[in-house]
Amino acid sequence: MPLKAAFAVIGIGCMVAAVFMAYQHGLRELGRSEAQHEQVRQQLDADLQRARSEMEELEERNLELTESLAKADRQLQVDGMAYKELARGVAVSTEQVAALSQELEFYRNIVSPPSGRSGLQIQNLDVQRTTEDGEYRYTIVLIQSLHHSEEIKGTVELEIQGSQEGKKKIVHLPEGDKDVIEVSFKYFQNLDGYFVLPDGYMPTGIKISISTDVANAPTIERWYPWPAV
């Protein structure tokens, strides 16, 4: 029995020693695992910090690009407005030059006409449609070239040439017993008036005839094709 007890004590002691050694080994392994976990955590923290820094740099760069884009857009708008204003100014200047050229040509024809002929001349005819059905407004410009010592007096007649229902027809102005169109000027005169064409009438042209009170003076006539109105 004492020998068995001794073996039992030795066996228990070996078991205790084995358990203790296993415990120590477990502590060492746990320490190494925690160290590895700490190392991984530190690496992750470093990667996260680097990612945050890169994101901040990208956000800052994006803000700079956005501001640059906005500035460029504003500059384009300013440049566009300046271009439109310049184009508008050029258009106005062109219209003014054209108007002045027409005015200069008008007075040149009065003082020194290209034809060299003096006396009464028909300078221009303008016909425009009004808002009323079949109604038109006409403007005739008359001038006296070279010599202006005598005042011109006379009457004007208009013949609107065309067709209706396939037949030639002339509309006379003034019509019937209406007041005649009188002229009385020394340098120039604008004649304005209105006329109405019958339904279905197809005009092709207008003839202007002017008779003056000068003895033996010929009637001044000029034919104009119907304008695109």
Image: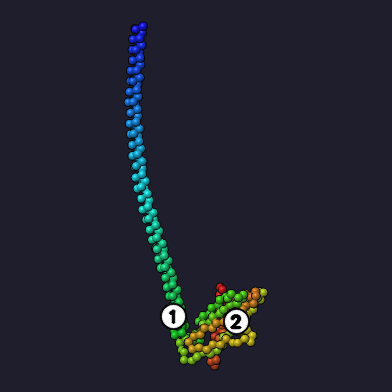
Coloring applied to the structure? rainbow
Question: From the viewer's perspective, is residue 133 above or below residue 142?
Answer: above
Q: Which residue is mark 2?
A: 159
* Res. 51 image quadrant: top left
- Residue 171's spot in the image, x, y percent? 62, 80
- Check the picture and name the quadrant holding the C terminus: bottom right
Is 93 left, or right, of 196 in this rendering? left
Residue depicted at 50% across the width and 88% down the height: 185
Question: From the viewer's perspective, is residue 77 above or below residue 156?
Answer: above
Residue kind at label 2, given as amino acid type = Glu
Question: From the viewer's perspective, is residue 59 above or below residue 163?
Answer: above
- Residue 175's spot in the image, x, y percent? 63, 84
Q: Foreground residue, 204 or 6? A: 6
Residue kind at label 1, given as amino acid type = Leu
Q: Foreground residue, 47 or 186? A: 47
Question: From the viewer's perspective, is residue 54 above or below residue 206?
Answer: above
Residue depicted at 46% across the width and 91% down the height: 149
Disc nearer the start of the sequence (1/2):
1
* Res. 85 image quadrant: bottom left
